[in-house]
Image (cartoon, grey):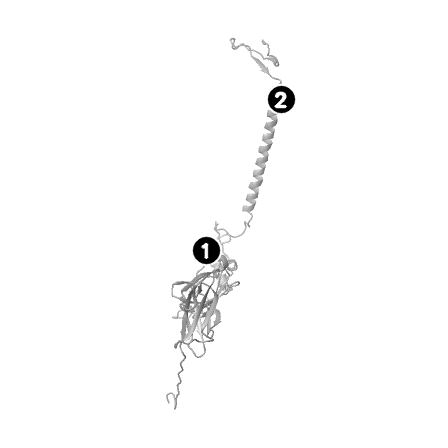
């Protein structure tokens, strides 16, 4: 059974079947505007474009995720983790080469302690090692091994302009550690923990700096710091006199390794000095040598009249022996 109603102008009439399950229901008539078919096609087209955009975004996300995974996992997955190479550490720190036998012992001990267990340590790895006892030194029964008394420590940093680290060398030229050389790493840091105690003189040399000559006091089981910066340098005036107050001409004056001479009035001037306490040395033939320290302030010049140094005349002792010396 079908029923129909009059459609309004501009519309098509479609009759739908009417079922007798609900007798009281009115006839169902659907009015469809001819333009609605175009609209539905537009909706389907927009839907298709949205699906294509979504697929493109998913593909782009997959490419980015793959690139990140490639960068993260780009290192050698077969590289051993947890086993530290002493040779690599020294090469990175620009440190002196350790003897081959000592390096082999250290490598075996580290490898034995690491075992085959997995590790989460990232590479490269930087570690600091303290020398407890030098195993390559000769030992004798009931005698302390050579070098066992060296437990003084020394550390510091060497920096240039704008705090830029310098790969300098710190050489012991006087004292019990004479001949020992400490090298700075890429961060300008140096250090040692097996030095002999006492007063020592060190010379610092670095490319791009004037260098320094400093006096340090090393104490057993204590750490001495030596930090030098060549960014803002200082200068000083001084005068050399004898104990009678007369000027000494031609006196050799060395401050922080920088050399100068006194004039006819005993005055001298030395510049390009690193801050802190610099070593001062004055020598003149016929006079006793003088050695001390002078405080240098960064970017400051010590004016005339503030520092005066007096040298004492040398003395001599002549001993004459006559007859037979020694037991018969």
x then y, percent, for residue 149? 40, 68
Other-residue count near label 1 (Cα within 10 Å), few / some / many at <14 / 14–19 / ≥20: few
Q: Position of residue 293 (x, y in %)?
A: 41, 68
Element on which disc 1 rests: helix
Compare marks 1 and 2 and give the one earlier in the sequence. Answer: 2
- The quarter of the image holding the C terminus is bottom left
Farthest-out residue, bottom? 323
What residue did someone put label 1 on? Answer: 113
- Front in this rendered view, residue 148 or 204: 204
74 to 130, vertically: above or below: above
Determine the residue positioned at 60% across, 27% down. 46
Numbered circle sitting on residue 38: 2
Q: Is residue 160 left or right of residue 35?
A: left
Name the image quarter holding the N terminus. top right
Question: Crowding near pointer 2: few (<14 within 10 Å), some, many (20+)?
Answer: few
Q: Report x, y in % for residue 215.
A: 43, 68
Q: CA distance from mark 1 to mark 2?
A: 78 Å
In terms of image quadrants, where is residue 246?
Answer: bottom left
């Amino acid at each position: 059974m079908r029923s129909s109603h009059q459609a309004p102008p501009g519309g098509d009439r479609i009759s739908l079947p009417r079922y007798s399950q609900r007798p009281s229901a009115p006839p169902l008539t659907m009015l469809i505007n001819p333009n609605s078919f175009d609209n539905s096609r537009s909706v389907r087209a927009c839907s298709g474009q949205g699906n294509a955009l979504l697929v493109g975004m998913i593909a782009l996300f997959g490419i980015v995720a793959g690139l990140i995974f490639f960068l993260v996992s780009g290192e050698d997955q077969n590289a051993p983790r947890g086993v530290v190479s002493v040779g690599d550490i020294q090469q990175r720190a620009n440190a002196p080469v350790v003897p081959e036998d000592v390096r082999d012992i250290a490598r075996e001990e580290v490898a034995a302690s690491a075992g085959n267990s997995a590790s989460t340590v990232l590479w490269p790895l930087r570690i600091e090692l303290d020398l407890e006892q030098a195993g390559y030194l000769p030992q004798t029964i009931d005698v302390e091994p050579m070098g066992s008394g060296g437990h003084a420590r020394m550390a510091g940093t060497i920096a240039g302009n704008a705090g830029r680290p310098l790969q300098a060398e710190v050489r012991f030229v006087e004292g019990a550690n004479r001949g020992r050389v400490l090298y700075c790493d890429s961060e300008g840091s140096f250090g040692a923990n097996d030095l002999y105690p006492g007063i020592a003189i060190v010379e610092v040399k670095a490319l791009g700096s004037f260098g320094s000559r400093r006096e340090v006091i090393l104490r057993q089981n204590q750490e001495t710091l030596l930090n030098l910066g060549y960014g803002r340098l200082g200068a000083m005036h001084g005068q050399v006199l004898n104990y009678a107050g007369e000027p000494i001409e031609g006196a050799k004056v060395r401050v922080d390794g920088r050399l100068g001479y006194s004039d006819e009035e005993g005055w001298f001037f030395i510049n390009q000095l690193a801050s802190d306490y610099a070593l001062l040395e004055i020598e003149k033939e016929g006079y006793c040598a003088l050695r001390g320290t002078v405080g240098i302030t960064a970017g400051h010049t010590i004016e005339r009249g503030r520092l005066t140094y007096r040298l004492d005349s040398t003395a001599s002792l002549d001993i004459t022996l006559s007859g037979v010396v020694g037991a018969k």
